[in-house]
Each structure stands twice: as C-alpha cells, then as structure tokens.
Image (cartoon, rainbow, N blue to C red):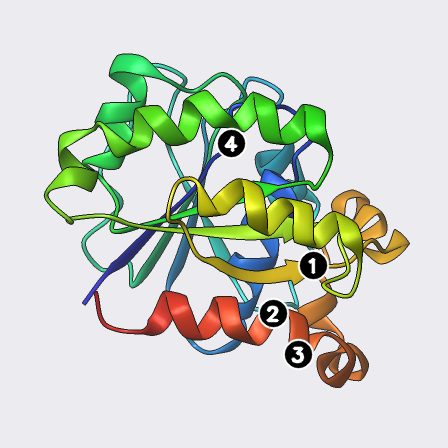
Amino acid sequence: MMRRILVANPKGGSGKSTLAVHLASWFARNDEIVYLGDMDRQHSSRYWLEARPRHLAAIRHWEVSEEEVTPPPKHCSIAILDTPAGLHGKRLKQVLNEVERVVVPVSPSRFDMLATREFFEELANTKAVRKERVDIGVVGMRVDPRTHAYQQLREFLDQFDLPVITCISQSQRYLQAADTGITLFDNDANHVAIDSQWRPLLDWLVSRH
C-alpha cells in the first residue's frame, strides 16, 4: 500500500525541507520505493535530490508544480510532498486530497506559532480533515522538550487538539545535509544519536491510518 505524506507550514524557514529529505532518506534506506515532490518555487528539496550521491539509497523525483500535483507513480510505496510557504485555500485542499498524513513543523517562537495559527484553523475546516481521511501531526523544530519554550509550544498546540509527535533539536548537521544531498540517516554512526528524536515520527508515519 502506498503511503502519501505532506510536509506543510505556511511560514518559510520552518524546517519543511529538512523533514522531507530526512524522511525520504529513511524510507529509502528501508527498501521502500520513495518519490519526493517539491512544490516550493525555491526547490530546496529538488536541488537536494539532484546533489544526492548515486551510491546512496535511491530517492526518485515526483514531478509536481506550484499549481498542480500529479499522482505519484503506481509502483511508488512512499510519496513525500514538500510544500511552499503560504500554502492555503484551493491549493491546500488539492494536496490534502492526495495524502493521508500531514507533518507540520513548528518552531517554539511566538512569531512562528502565531503565523501557524490560521493554518491550523484552515486545516480543521477542510473536508479531508473533518472526515478524518487525513491525520495531522506536529513536529517541534529546533526545540528541547526540557525547556520552557517547549512547554509554551505544547500550550499553544493544545488549543487545536493536535499531537506533538516529536521534537528535533538544533544541529549544524542538518544544514550540512541540505548542501550535500546526504542526510543523517545515510551515516550509520548517527543512528543511535538521532533515533530517540526521529523514532516517534517514523513510527507514527508507518502506523495504520
């Protein structure tokens, strides 16, 4: 069965591409047929994919545009869609019809949380979410669960009854991955160090809808 995952947040710089490429890399390493699509005009995920060394687990390009999302190939087992800032309205409804899971990265700053408020409200009012065809999970980006900032993030998200699946801490290694086409999952030495952060999200994505 194909799993289709949307990574979305209306704010630029929230960590969408970091999540999208790392998820694609993890699934590819686990022998899935992975397609990665990029609707953002900056094409961060697409450029990352072009830079990816060929000896690493294969990730294929899912051809999409800013205006239209064509279905991924039928033989695909994992389809991941990286989206642009400002995704809303008709385009948001269109992409929600193509996926089963939505991953929303949110940073624990007041500005980022306020910028995400309308997005959560719009999501809640879409037919796909109301009819429970789509599950939404939040990932805290650049945050430590032991901090006051994390507690503020949880209090904000409680207003929308949305789960915080996990938190991904700040690391220069994610910036390096963006430039090289290589993720932390492509280096076996990193697995133990990052497993506690990524494992809850990976388990959530592979669980039954």
Q: Badge 1 local density, few (<14 within 10 Å), some, or many (20+)? A: many
Q: Is residue 125 above or below residue 2?
A: above
According to the picture, the residue beneath numbered tag 3 turns out to be 195
Q: Are marks 3 and 2 in contact (CB under 8 Å)?
A: yes
Q: Secondary structure at mark 2?
A: helix
Residue 165 located left or right of residue 21:
left
Identity, as a three-letter code, of the amino acid under mark 3: Asp
Residue 10 picture location, percent across and down: 51, 23
> Which callout, 4 or 2, points at the residue further toward the start of the chain?
4
Q: Which residue is mark 2?
A: 198
What amino acid type should be assigned to the residue bearing mark 4? Asn
Q: Is residue 144 left or right of residue 95?
A: right
Amino acid marked by disc 2: Trp
The alpha-carbon separation of the residues under discs 4 and 3 comes to: 24 Å
In the rendered image, residue 34, in percent from the top left (x then y), is placed at 41, 59
Which residue is most to the left? 131
Instruction: First in sequence, mark 4 or 3: give its number.
Output: 4
